[in-house]
Image: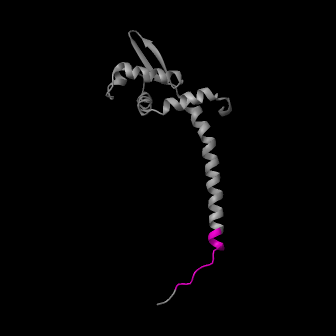
Amino acid sequence: MVMNLRSRDLDATFAALADPTRRAILARLATGEATVNELTEPFEMTQPAVSKHLKVLEHAGLISRRRDGQRRLSLLEPKRLAEASAWLEQYRDFWESSFHRLEGVLDELQRARPRRKKSVR
C-alpha cells in the first residue's frame, strides 16, 4: 500500500497538513460532517478564507464535499491520512532500530570504561 502512494499525492497531503487551520478543520470533521459556516465558527476568518482551506484539503484527498439540498457538507476522507501514516511508519521503524543499536553501543562503551575510585578525604 505504501509503495503505491504517488509522490504528488504525498506532497499534497503533507502540504495540506502543514497549516494549523487545516489541521483544526480535519479535527472538527473527525467528529462528523459540517457546513462551511459551521467550520468557520471557531476561527477569526471569513467564510471565503475557510473555503480556500477546504479546497486545499479536498485537492489533497483529505476531505470530500457533497450537497444536501441547499447545504454543501464537508466530510473527512481517512484513506489519504492512513496512507501518509503508513509512509511515516517506515521511518519510525528505521529510527527505532537506529536508537536501539545506539543504545547497545553506548551500553558497551559504558561497560568498557574503567571505573574511577572514589577518593576519601
Q: Is residue 90 left or right of residue 60?
A: right
The single residue placed furthest to the top in the displayed view is 69
Residue 99 drawn at (x, y percent): 61, 55
What residue range appears in magenta? 109-118
The quarter of the picture where the N terminus appears is top right
| Quarter holding residue 10 | top right
Q: Is residue 2 left or right of residue 25?
A: right
On screen, residue 21 above or below 65: below
Along the line of sight, the residue nearer the viewer: 107 or 35:
107
Along the line of sight, the residue nearer the viewer: 9 or 96:
9
Residue 41 drawn at (x, y percent): 32, 25
Determine the residue positioned at 44% across, 22% down.
54
Colouring of the image: one colour
Magenta stretch, overall SS: loop
Q: Is residue 22 left or right of residue 85?
A: left
Residue 115 drawn at (x, y percent): 60, 79
On screen, residue 42 above or below 55: below
| Quarter holding residue 113 | bottom right
Determine the residue positioned at 44% across, 12% down.
67
**Mark count:** 0
Residue 112 highlighted magenta (yes or no)? yes
Residue 39 drawn at (x, y percent): 37, 24
Residue 30 highlighted magenta (yes or no)? no
Determine the residue positioned at 37% across, 18% down.
48
